Amino acid sequence: MKPLGHLRLGVNIDHVATVRNARGSAYPDPIRAATVAEAAGADGITAHLREDRRHITDTDIEGLMAALTTPLNFEMAATDEMQKIALRHRPHAVCIVPEKREERTTEGGLEVAREENRLAGFIAPLREAGCRVSIFIAADARQIEAAARIGAQVIELHTGAYCDYHAEGHFAERDAELDRLREMAGFAHSLGLEVHAGHGLTYDTVGPVAAIPQVMELNIGHFLIGEAIFRGLGPAITEMRRVMDAARA
């Protein structure tokens, strides 16, 4: 069997900012976390600038753009404000995600099919500015087809349901969701889309997703920041890199 290509790891640093903002202090510093992640083997950094600024701030984005040597994946809602910010900074990648003020974190994938015309117009200037546009969606053929039609270059498959089923011990449902992720990764690839995945992945759940041949990048944040409390951020990322590479091989 031919070895699979390198699987990129994007480390989401949002919840370093969550801890900082809990005290209203200057630390822990998300930009320092990003540089530690790079040194530990991250292939990129993900940061979500929410409309309510509950974790990452505008100043953080400016600092990340100045400090990073690896690509920044700028997660954002499809709003005029966020589009203007992205066009000002022109990060390597933008990932369009759904956003609700009452949610604790991003829940579910973006509804692309119902807003196809608006989203096509929204992402066009971002593509023209040189940003790689990704859409965060559920493993659903209808949404994947819509993402391809609006001109997205990448989809990120939402792995949250798969991880939740695993955590709850619902293994039949977990395996069915994993099969769906595999099938939809192949389908997206057939449409010419680059496939990423993320949300809720841990050492226990990352392997089967990392082994999906069409998946080129995983974005992982909350688990790694939590694990950093016990083993340090660099070692936590190094271990995730090891588990991913072993599954990929």
Image: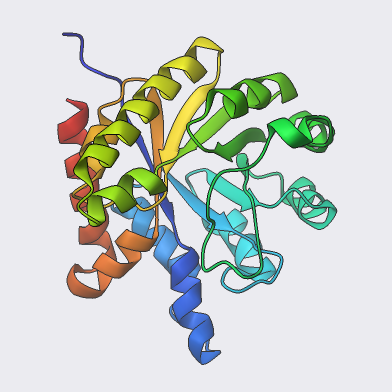
145 or 11: nearer the eye?
Answer: 145
Query: In x, y percent, where is residue 24?
Result: 55, 89
Query: In x, y percent, where is residue 65?
Result: 61, 54
Classify residue 232 by image quadrant: bottom left
**Colouring scheme, one of rainbow, by chain, secondary structure, one colour:** rainbow
Query: In x, y percent, where is residue 138?
Result: 51, 37
Horizontal side of residue 138 vs 2, given as left or right? right
Instruction: Report if residue 169 is visible in the image.
Output: yes
| Residue at x 62%, y 43% (from the top left corner) | 110
Query: In x, y percent, where is residue 66?
Result: 60, 57
165 or 246: nearer the eye?
Answer: 165
| Residue at x 60%, y 67% (from the top left corner) | 60
Instruction: Report if residue 29 is visible in the image.
Output: no
Q: Quadrant of the C terminus?
A: top left
Classify residue 230 by image quadrant: bottom left
Horizontal side of residue 89 vs 161, given as left or right? right
240 or 190: nearer the eye?
Answer: 190
| Residue at x 82%, y 35% (from the top left corner) | 125
Q: Quadrant of the N terminus?
A: top left
Horizontal side of residue 132 vs 206, given as left or right? right
Q: Is residue 114 above or below residue 102?
A: above
**Count of numbered circles in the view:** 0
Q: Is residue 189 above or below residue 80?
A: above
Q: Is residue 223 above or below residue 22?
A: above
